[in-house]
Amino acid sequence: MEHATNEHGHVEHASVRTYLGVAAALGIITAVEVMVFYIEALHPVLVPILLTLSAAKFVLVVGFFMHLKYDARLFRGLFVGPLAVAIAIILAMLALYGVFTGGGAPGA
Amino acid sequence: MTDDAAATAEGHYTSTGLPNRKLLMWTFIGSECMLFGSLIMTYLVYRGRSITGPYPEELLNIPFITVTTFVLLMSSLMMVLALAAVQRNDMRQGKLWLLMTALLGTVFLGGQVYEFSHFLHEGLGLSTNLFGASFYLLTGTHGAHVFVGVLWLLSLFVLAVRGRLDARHAETVEITGLYWHFVDVVWIVLFTLIYLLVS
């Protein structure tokens, strides 16, 4: 992937304007998350809404601030691989402990 | 110049064509995903299983923690501004944003110390119930990471003040930034799972 470099030979991943835009988006999403938390009518769908908003913030920070959107594919693999394994283990353990079905621990 | 070539311009050339220190940091971050994944899993499995109080819904202060979350998010902005300044060799701005990042990290830590002391005062210790054990372990581990990050940022600031940090060391600042943003990303997840999905 080709990117502009400055006079010191450093890759400029994103402009300061982009960083400010991402920071504003992060602030707004956090405010929306807290608003949603206090709206009683949204409580039946609170979990999917909050997880989606949290995932959006996660992707913004990793993609723009950590430059994964612009950087080498190997870095992406080194991050996404273990992250996927961690998420899979969390989901498997939650299922095993009956968290999704409201049950108890195995053997309990 | 390609991304990879530019990235290795100041450092060592490797068989991957990528800077080895950055590769190491991403590998470390991958391992950290597994560490925090196991702690988050423990918290979620134990959630709602405490048989004695105090319970999370009695203790967690959402407005307060929202402010400290916002502080940590803004510290990430300061970090990328510091990196951009160092890459431009604008060390006056670089020093300012590095110090601001460390300062906001310290404010976040202050908030965590306040929260922990408040919880202890309300009777929630490490061994009081399952919530106390899993909460302190998870947020405490995160707080320890923030503390290490603040020390790392302050050491870069001191190097910059002494004139030993400039555009040639931008990769060092970038690697510090990767660590700092990862700490931020972990908190994004914890804020939702611990504080917002409390019930």
Image (spheres, rainbow, N blue to C red):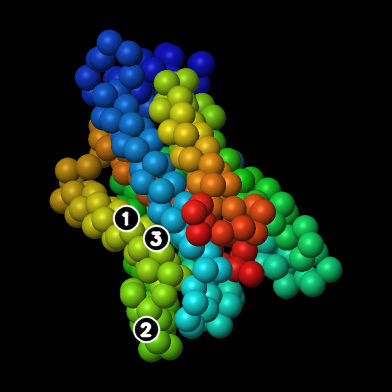
Q: Secondary structure at mark 1?
A: helix
The residue nearer to you, when weighing B52 against B167, is B52
Q: Secondary structure at mark 2?
A: helix
Furthest residue toward front: A107
Give the residue at x 36% y 46%. Answer: B35
Q: Earlier in the sequence, mark 3 or mark 1?
A: 3
Give the residue at x 67% y 61%. Answer: A33
Q: Which mark is residue B145?
A: 1
Residue B79: tell me if it is visible. no
Q: Nearer the viewer, mark 3 or mark 1?
A: 3
> Where on the picture, by quarter, is residue A101?
bottom right
Q: Chain of mark 1?
A: B
Give the residue pinned by disc 3: B138
Examine the rendered structure and indicate whether residue A38 appears above or below residue B177: below
Disc 1 residue crowd, few under 14, some 14–19, many 20+, Cα 10 Å: some
Q: Secondary structure at mark 3?
A: helix
Give the residue at x 53% y 42%. Answer: A92
Furthest residue toward top: B15
Examine the rendered structure and indicate whether residue A54 appears above or below residue A46: above
The image position of residue A102, as x and y in percent, is 65, 59
The residue nearer to you, when weighing B134 against A54, is B134
Give the residue at x 25% y 52%. Answer: B152
Contact check, label 3 and label 1, Cβ < 8 Å = no
CA–CA distance in space, label 2 to label 1: 21 Å
Inspect the image, locate mark 3, and give the three-letter code of the amino acid beneath it. Leu
Residue A99: tell me if it is visible. yes
Examine the rendered structure and indicate whether residue A9 appears above or below residue B190: above
Q: Which mark is residue B99?
A: none
Examine the rendered structure and indicate whether residue B21 appears above or below residue B43: above
Give the residue pinned by disc 2: B120
